[in-house]
Image (cartoon, coloured by chain):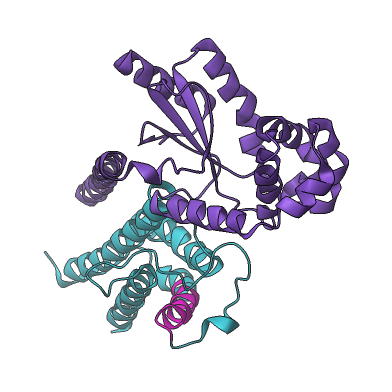
């Protein structure tokens, strides 16, 4: 195997991991809303808007490995991360509920899931977006060297 | 091609895990409801709850409903038909889950009508005229008064009785039970403590018939 092949293999693996993260997050959020019937709040919807398309973007970027993928996936991930971070702050009480944007129906700060006392849905979303962003930056570094 | 296989395999694996998750969650929920039905039956039927049907009925159909909910109204004749087809076997229990904005107003009217012994007549009138005062999920409470005399009610007495703070307590208790039972949408059905998992007319009929076959 040549060095070039090896390089391309690592790139492929990075995108592949991103795809796995996006797919698991998408199905996970669908599990919460469709199976456990937690109604998604406004902020959850914005995060979903930026997470769901990543599944297809990463999948198409795998065959063949598309170096342009950063250009398409990074903006989505960054905006999604912004919503997730804001939601996380709201959820954990750093931002008071009185200024939250969803008025009727579902409250963005109502806790539905509390695994082991600290894992919440916005936290899972924040972790997913963060991992994808870190992987994309790693990929960009590898491609520029 | 090897890479394609990896992706295919992972995709299938994730979907299978998703399916397994659904199965495990549903089994867990069923056990939970079963436990609640045996250990804490009053969470399904309270002393004050309005019921219809014979006290000897072995199949309890619990309906968490909202007078302003269109689907609840659509299910009302269907439930009555099921009861007529299985005389004496089904007991209907009405619980309140007034999720629509301002819907507790109609619950108060219903509870006030109960004092005049006109509960079911009033509920019928409400559901039949619902589109006039609750159209498009925008309840307009004042419009309902035009239709209430059809149920043969003493309107002045209703206006007085509906302010009874006891009714507010009933609503709060029902909402608390709905939350405990994971009812987030109306109508929320339970048949002898078993929840209607997949929503629809056929599914409800099937659940009731299964329970009847088991008990009779």
Residue at figure coordinates x 49%, y 60% from the top left? A40
Would residue B63 be found to the left or right of residue A92 on screen? Answer: right
Q: Position of residue B185 (x, y in %)?
A: 53, 47
| Position above or below: B145 against A97 | above
Q: Which colour is chain A painted?
A: cyan
> In front here: B7 or B158?
B158
- Asked if residue B140 can be seen in this view, the reply is no
Residue at figure coordinates x 71%, y 37% from the top left? B116
Residue lying farthest right? B146
| Position above or below: B136 against A29 | above
- Which region of the structure is painted magenta? A77-93
Q: Which of the 4 image quarters holds residue B166?
A: bottom right
Q: Main secondary structure of the magenta part?
A: helix
Q: Position of residue A61 (x, y in %)?
A: 38, 60
Number of numbered discs visible in the structure rendering: 0
Would residue B102 be found to the left or right of residue B141 on screen? Answer: left
**Chain that is purple in the image:** B
Residue at figure coordinates x 60%, y 76% from the top left? A101
Q: Which of the 4 image quarters holds residue B29?
A: top left
Residue A79 covered by magenta stretch: yes
| Position above or below: B190 against A136 | above
- Asked if residue B91 can be seen in this view, the reply is yes
Residue A94 covered by magenta stretch: no
Q: Position of residue B65 (x, y in %)?
A: 57, 42
Residue lying farthest left? A1
Residue at figure coordinates x 21%, y 65% from the top left? A9
> From the image, which quarter does the C terminus of chain B lie in?
top left
Q: Position of residue B76 (x, y in %)?
A: 62, 29
> In front here: A98 or A101?
A98
């Amino acid at each position: 195997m040549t060095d070039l092949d090896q390089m391309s293999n690592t790139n492929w693996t990075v995108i592949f991991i991103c795809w796995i993260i996006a797919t698991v997050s998408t199905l996970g959020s669908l599990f919460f809303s469709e199976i456990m019937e937690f109604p998604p709040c406004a902020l959850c919807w914005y995060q979903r808007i930026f997470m769901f398309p990543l599944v297809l973007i990463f999948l198409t970027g795998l065959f063949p490995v598309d170096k342009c993928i950063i250009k398409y996936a990074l903006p989505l991930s960054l905006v999604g991360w912004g919503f997730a971070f804001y939601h996380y702050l709201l959820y954990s009480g750093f931002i008071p509920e009185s200024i939250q944007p969803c008025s009727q129906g579902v409250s963005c700060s109502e806790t539905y899931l509390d695994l082991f006392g600290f894992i919440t849905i916005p936290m899972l979303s924040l972790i997913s977006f963060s991992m994808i962003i870190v992987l994309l930056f790693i990929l960009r570094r590898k491609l520029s060297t | 091609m090897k890479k394609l296989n990896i992706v295919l395999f992972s995709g299938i694996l994730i979907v299978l895990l998703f399916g397994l998750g659904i199965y495990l969650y549903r089994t867990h929920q069923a056990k939970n409801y079963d436990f609640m039905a045996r250990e804490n039956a009053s969470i399904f039927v309270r002393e004050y709850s309005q019921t219809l049907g014979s006290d000897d009925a072995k199949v309890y159909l619990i309906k968490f409903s909202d007078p302003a909910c269109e689907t609840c109204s659509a299910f009302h004749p269907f439930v009555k038909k099921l009861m007529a087809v299985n005389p004496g076997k089904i007991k209907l229990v009405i619980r309140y889950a007034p999720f629509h904005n301002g819907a507790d107003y109609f619950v108060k009217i219903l509870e006030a009508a109960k004092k005049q012994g006109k509960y079911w007549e009033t509920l019928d009138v409400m559901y039949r005229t619902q589109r006039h005062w609750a159209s498009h999920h925008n309840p307009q409470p004042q419009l309902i008064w035009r239709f209430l005399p059809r149920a043969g009610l003493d309107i002045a007495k209703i206006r007085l009785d509906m302010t009874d703070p006891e009714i507010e307590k009933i609503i709060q208790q029902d909402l608390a039970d709905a939350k405990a039972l994971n009812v987030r949408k109306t109508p929320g059905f339970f048949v002898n403590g078993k929840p209607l998992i997949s929503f629809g007319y056929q599914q409800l009929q099937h659940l009731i018939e299964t329970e009847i076959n088991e008990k009779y």
